[in-house]
């Protein structure tokens, strides 16, 4: 929401009484909760968070140094909202949806002054509108009335705003319009344009929230193969510094089969967001070969930006995601990281002198996390289409301690847990997702899809892999005490099979042009190859072949090279035959 949007709104003024970091107290301000206000002589954007008598408390989304008592506070009378319409894709925003490239152009410098503002979308850019309704049609709130080609990848569906009454279409013509011009007129007097506003703290309406039954295919073997997430699901990626949270989210943003990606960099280091900004425009969407940015909206609120803006950037991202969901698209929201968001809440809470909860976080931490993740889901929209928002949040527990409040409260809410392990990262095992601690509660409802689309024994193969890895974990405790050679031959062979599962199946090279993305069909064939080695090896062991000869066959190491094979189907077929022939020749 920009100043440009509030010129006709009712305003009221107060004066600053005190300033404490990002928290400003004003007196004599006629305001409601969550109203947007402009603070001080420079007009810094803020939001009302507490009202007590004639004192109004505001959290300011910009640096407040130099702001002092007696300066004015101007109320817009409107809640913090985002501008919705064509132009949000291939855009980079800050935490309150100010387009960073536009601000840079205004300032003539990458260093932004305080109080600079701009609408979330270009209000003057013109778009070619093609109506999908005609005079006499009756439309209701949320109905699609036309289409705009927003990017080469995405058609933007122009909808009747949810807070309209609807009615009979009086006029609808194709043509070139800017987003503020009327494109459809209704007999009720309502005029539909390509521009909407929506309060970020209010979920957009839907008819029904359904059980998701389609996976969000990520192209990452350990995720799709062992711990899948559904379209419309929720997931957490906790892990210590350097364990690969950001790279994992980058991989999901690049290769997940969502229609739209909303990537929120919440309090992360600037160099990580720089990598996203530099890489994404150069990458091709694996689904269609178009630029990846053509389906991506970036919200960059880095660690050097004002802490209060982190609190709003998550809501800005989820509101944009819900808007595209209403068009019938599947949207994936990456939040990196929710820990920095929680730290912003802790900062504001301490400035308000609220009673602290565990480790200083506010007592309402769990409620705020739940409110955010609850806005994800697979929905039947009010216009009859179906769409989804998948929320994937990185968590950065200090020292990798998963018992800290943000991680624990997140785990109570999300249904997929991808636990990153510092020990695996130190051993250069990436993605460093610990298969013993991670889980997915979506497996049972997603198995029918994998069985129909990939292979009818998908669930059985996965369970076999899980059982082998569990057995290896138990055997490793014995190995550390007595050594591997003291184990029976069958257990030594199990360890060898588990090694191939870890090295060939669970590890994946995000920087290899082929291995960076693994379709479910390839994931399945890799697992069947390892199981072929397992079955043939145990048959040879039962026939009396020494375990040393079994593990030394020449073809087995080729299992580790399946991931980098472009023509993997032929490679796997030849490898299975070679393994079978070589092992059977031993007896």
Image (tube, helix red, strand yellow):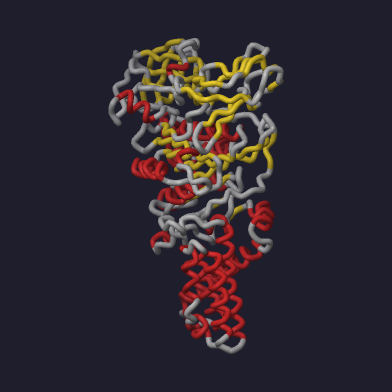
In percent of width and height, residue 329 lies at: 59, 38
* Image quarter of the C terminus: bottom right
Residue drawn 48% across and 29% down? 87
Left or right of 37? Residue 390 is: right
Specify whether 81 is left or right of 459: left
Q: Is residue 57 visible?
A: no
In this orientation, which residue lies closer to the viewer: 425 or 25?
Answer: 425
The location of residue 315, given as percent across then percent down, is 51, 32
> In the rendering, at what x and y percent does residue 417 appear?
55, 52
Name the one closer to the observer, 439 or 348: 439
Q: Is residue 45 above or below residue 306?
A: above
* Depicted 106 relative to depicted 410: above or below: above
Q: How many dots with numbers?
A: 0
Left/right placement of residue 146 relative to residue 210 reads left
Residue in view at x 66 percent, y 14 percent: 170
**Residue at 67% across / 12% down in the picture?**
188
Occupied quadrant, residue 443? bottom right
Residue drawn at (37%, 31%) of the image: 306
What percent of the width, then of the height, locates residue 461? Answer: 63, 65
């Amino acid at each position: 929401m920009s100043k440009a949007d509030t010129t006709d709104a009712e305003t009221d003024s107060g004066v600053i009484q005190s300033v404490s970091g990002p928290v400003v107290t004003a007196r004599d301000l006629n305001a409601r909760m969550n109203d947007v206000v402009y603070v001080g002589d420079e007009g810094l954007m803020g939001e009302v968070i507490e009202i007590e008598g004639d004192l109004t408390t505001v959290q300011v989304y910009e640096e407040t140094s130099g702001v002092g008592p007696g300066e004015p506070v101007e109320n817009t009378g409107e809640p913090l909202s985002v501008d919705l319409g064509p132009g949000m894709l291939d855009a980079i925003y800050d935490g309150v949806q100010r387009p960073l490239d536009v601000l840079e152009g205004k300032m003539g410098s990458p260093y932004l002054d305080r109080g600079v503002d701009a609408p979330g979308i270009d209000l003057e850019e013109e778009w070619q509108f093609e109506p999908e309704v005609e005079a006499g049609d009756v439309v209701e709130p949320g109905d699609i009335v036309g289409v705009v080609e927003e990017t080469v990848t995405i058609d933007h569906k122009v909808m009747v705003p949810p807070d309209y009454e609807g009615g009979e279409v009086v006029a609808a013509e194709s043509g070139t319009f800017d987003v503020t011009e009327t494109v459809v007129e209704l007999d009720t007097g309502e005029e539909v344009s390509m521009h909407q506003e929506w309060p970020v703290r209010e979920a957009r309406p839907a008819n029904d929230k359904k059980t998701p039954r389609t996976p969000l295919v990520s192209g990452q073997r350990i995720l799709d193969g062992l711990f899948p997430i559904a379209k419309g699901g929720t997931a957490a990626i906790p892990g210590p510094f350097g364990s690969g949270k950001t790279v994992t989210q980058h991989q999901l943003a690049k290769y997940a089969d969502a229609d739209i990606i909303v990537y929120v960099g919440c309090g992360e280091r600037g160099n990580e967001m720089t990598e996203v900004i530099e890489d994404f425009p150069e990458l091709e969407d694996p689904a269609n070969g178009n630029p990846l940015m053509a389906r991506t909206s970036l919200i960059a609120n880095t660690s050097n930006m004002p802490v209060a803006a982190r609190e709003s950037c998550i809501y800005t991202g989820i509101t944009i995601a819900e808007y595209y969901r209403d068009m019938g698209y599947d949207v994936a929201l990456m939040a990196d990281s929710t820990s920095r968001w929680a730290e912003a809440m802790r900062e504001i809470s301490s400035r308000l002198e609220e009673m602290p909860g565990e480790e200083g976080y506010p007592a309402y931490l769990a409620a705020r996390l739940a409110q955010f993740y609850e806005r994800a889901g697979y929905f039947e929209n009010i216009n009859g289409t179906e769409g989804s928002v998948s929320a994937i949040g990185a968590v950065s527990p200090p020292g990798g301690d998963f018992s800290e409040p943000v991680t624990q409260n997140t785990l109570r809410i999300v249904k997929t847990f991808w636990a990153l392990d510092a020990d695996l990262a130190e051993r250069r095992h990436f993605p460093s997702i610990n298969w013993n601690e991670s889980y997915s509660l979506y497996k049972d409802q997603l198995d029918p899809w994998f069985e129909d689309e990939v292979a009818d024994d998908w669930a059985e193969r996965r369970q076999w892999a899980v059982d082998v890895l569990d057995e290896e974990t138990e055997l490793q405790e014995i190995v550390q005490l007595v050594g591997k050679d003291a184990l029976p031959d069958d257990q030594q062979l199990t360890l060898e099979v588990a090694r191939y599962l870890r090295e060939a199946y669970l590890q994946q090279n995000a920087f290899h042009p082929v291995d960076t993305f693994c379709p479910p069909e390839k994931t399945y064939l890799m697992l069947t190859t390892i199981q072929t080695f397992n079955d043939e090896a145990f048959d040879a062991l039962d026939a009396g072949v020494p375990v040393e000869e079994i593990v030394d066959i020449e073809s087995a190491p080729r299992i580790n090279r399946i991931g980098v094979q472009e023509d993997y189907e032929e490679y796997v077929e030849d490898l299975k035959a070679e393994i079978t022939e070589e092992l059977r020749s031993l007896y």
